[in-house]
Amino acid sequence: MEASKSVVFPNEMLAEMEIEDTFFPTNSKQIGIAVLSHFQDSAYIMRIYQLLHKNESDSFEPIQELASFSFSSKEHFDDFLKMLPNMTGLEMLMLLNPLFPGDDLLSH
């Protein structure tokens, strides 16, 4: 069983957002993904960050935002979060580049 990984977030990120989940791919020990959220203008906002391992601190830190998604309900947010680690690259590309802006490809 793998030991838990340390992830360090800047205080200003945690002041504005909540940590929802972290994912660590099995093909690299140097990168990870963090999903954070906040509520804004009656929408649940999901922000996905790339994490990079820092040898000096033996912890992961966010280095860039990869994508953000907006949901009208917490239920839709949670459903998407459950599917996120199992999405293929092609599915993610289609979500990031919809044919019709605002079209929810996952509900079809």
Image (cartoon, grey):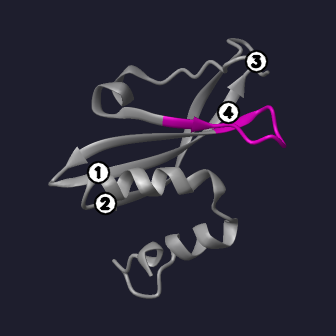
Task: State the residue at coordinates (38%, 30%).
Answer: 13
Q: Residues within 10 Å of mark 3 (few under 14, many from 20)?
A: few
Q: Are marks 1 and 4 in contact (CB under 8 Å)?
A: no
Residue that lies at the very extreme toward the right in this rendered image:
27
Membership of 30 in magenta stretch: yes
Based on the displayed image, in which of its 4 quarters is residue 39 positioned? Answer: top left
Q: Mark 3 points at which residue?
A: 55
Q: Do the residues labelled 1 and 2 touch (CB within 8 Å)?
A: yes
- Estimate the x, y position of residue 101 in percent, counting from the top left: 37, 81
The mark closer to the camera, 1 or 2, is 1
Is 17 located above or below residue 94 in the figure? above
Could you give the CA–CA distance between mark 1 and mark 2, rounded to whole angstroms? 7 Å
Could you give the CA–CA distance between mark 1 and mark 4, rounded to whole angstroms? 28 Å
Q: Name the amino acid type tagged 1.
A: Lys
Looking at the rendered structure, which numbered label has been put on residue 74? 1
First in residue order: circle 1 vs circle 3: 3
Could you give the CA–CA distance between mark 2 and mark 3, rounded to whole angstroms? 36 Å
Write down the region rendered in magenta: 21-32
The mark closer to the camera, 1 or 3, is 1
Q: Residues within 10 Å of mark 1 (few under 14, many from 20)?
A: few
Residue that lies at the very extreme toward the bottom in this rendered image:
99
Query: Which SS class for mark 1?
Result: helix
Q: Name the amino acid type tagged 3.
A: Asn
Q: Mark 4 points at which residue?
A: 52
Labels in figure, total: 4
Is 29 located above or below residue 81 in the figure? above
Closer-to-camera residue (47/78): 78
Left or right: where does residue 45 sit relative to residue 91? left
